[in-house]
Image (cartoon, helix red, strand yellow):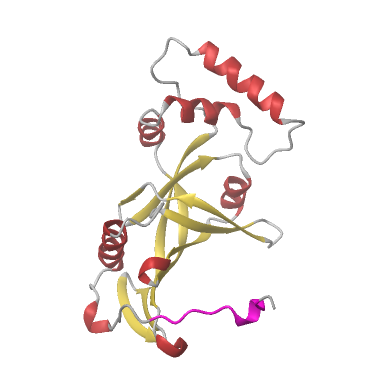
Amino acid sequence: MSLSIADIRAEYSKHTLDISDVQGDPIEQFQLWFDEANKVEISEVNAMHLSTVNPNGMPSSRIILLKGIENNGFVFFTNYQSDKGKDLDANPAAALLFFWKELERQVRIQGHVEKISKDDSEQYFQSRPKGSQIGAWTSPQSTVIESRELLEERENAIAEKYKDEEVLPKPEQWGGYILKPIRIEFWQGRPNRLHDRILYSQVDGHWKINRLAP
């Protein structure tokens, strides 16, 4: 007999989390957890779930990659004309979610997103592998295309155009964002679904720390 979806479950017991254990600043706490996740060699440790909301109030989510923690925020890059870019233009509020199964941990982040500088975006763009640079020029991200073949033809044409160049200029429609958090929750799996949840909330420019019921 096949297992019912409702019967799939796992018990969590690897770690504990208490207010007395955490840093006063959530960015520092995130960096500690991120470093621990990196040490256990989690695949794509910087993969995160980005949620945005379009002008009609419809939420949308996708997996993207964290590319930096700086200026008290979380940096990522994308096509500004993509669905997520259009969502963020209309509503800069967004959420991030990290899930590190091997450590039975997740981090939920809510905040406001703004574009980083053009110079910083260009510096990162030109540090990427040349194939990724070509890919950014090739794809009109989130738009309908007729076929894979047309995409590959465009890729080949751009590769030919820049065959003698080590780096490409950054497309105007491509660049970085930084999410400045206002709430960060650290979740540690515990037995019997009595998980540890520690929430940081910004209050008058300071971080307030509370324990949440699981």
Task: State the residue at coordinates (22%, 83%).
Answer: 20
Residue lying furthest right in this view? 146
**Residue visible at 65% across and 56% down in the picture:** 54
| Residue 62, percent from left and from top | 57, 54
Residue shown at 26% from the left, 69% from the top: 25
| 58 versus 125 height, above or below | below
Q: Quadrant of residue 194?
A: bottom left
Is there any visible trace of residue 83 in the rendered image? Answer: yes
Dominant secondary structure, magenta: loop
**x, y percent for residue 116:** 41, 43
**Is 43 rendered above or below residue 1?**
above
First to last magenta residue range = 3-12
From the viewer's perspective, is residue 135 above or below residue 206? above
| Residue 140 percent across, percent down from the top left | 64, 33
Q: Quadrant of residue 197?
A: bottom left
195 relative to 79 in the view: left or right: left
Query: Could you say which quadrant of the image residue 191 lies in?
Result: bottom left
| The N terminus lies in quadrant | bottom right
Q: Is residue 20 left or right of residue 43?
A: left
Q: Is residue 17 magenta?
A: no
- Verify whether residue 10 appears in magenta: yes
Residue lying at 61% horizontally and 31% vertically, measured from the top left: 139
Q: Residue furthest front?
A: 1
Where is residue 84? Give x, y as percent. Answer: 59, 49
Query: Which of 167/191 is in front?
Result: 191
Q: Indicate whether 123 appears above or below 180.
A: above
Q: Quadrant of the C terminus?
A: bottom left
Q: Nearer the viewer, residue 101 or 4?
A: 4
Residue 149 located left or right of residue 39: right
Q: Between residues 23 and 161, which one lies in front from this camera angle?
A: 161
Residue 214 visible in the snapshot: no
